[in-house]
Image: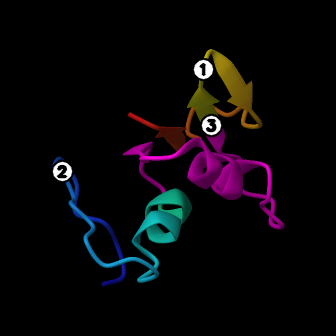
Amino acid sequence: MTEIPVNCLFNKKKTGCGATELAIRNSIPTLIAMPYVALVKNKTVCRTDDIEVLGVYEDITERGTSRNSPVLIPP
């Protein structure tokens, strides 16, 4: 898979397959729900590239200023 399907819910069951990173890197504004705050932090604070990602959890935000930045939200 080279891109995430648009206008759908994508239930990723297999971990480590790169689907979250694929969603972050695509050019389409994306909302990603994650089960744990640690995962949100891993995809925001721990980034080593220049991609801006907005992580939202417990009324706190991490990085990301662009309107097109992916948003990571734990349920």
Residue type, mark 2 in image? Leu
Image quarter (top left, top right, bottom left or bottom right) of the N terminus: bottom left
Q: Is residue 35 above or below residue 74?
A: below
Q: Residue at x 52, y 38 (%)?
A: 71
Nearest-to-viewer mark from 1 and 3: 1
Mark toward the start of the polypeptide (2 vs 3): 2
Image quarter (top left, top right, bottom left or bottom right) of the C terminus: top left
Residue type, mark 1 in image? Glu
Q: Is residue 38 above or below residue 56?
A: below
The residue under label 1 is: 58
Between the residue at mark 2 and the residue at mark 3, the CA separation in whole angstroms equals 19 Å
Nearest-to-viewer mark from 2 and 1: 1
Where's residue 69, x and y in %?
59, 41
Residue type, mark 3 in image? Gly
Q: Identify which residue, 33 or 2, lies in the foreground.
A: 33
Mark toward the start of the polypeptide (2 vs 1): 2
- Residue 25 figure quarter: bottom right
The residue under label 2 is: 9
Where's residue 33, x and y in %?
39, 43
Q: Is residue 33 magenta?
A: yes
What span is colored magenta in the figure?
27-54
Q: Is residue 38 magenta?
A: yes
Image-based side of 64 in relation to 68, left or right: right
Task: Report the disc number at residue 55.
Answer: 3
SS of the residue under disc 2: loop
Label 1: how many Cα within 10 Å (few below 14, some 14–19, many 20+): few
SS of the residue under disc 3: strand
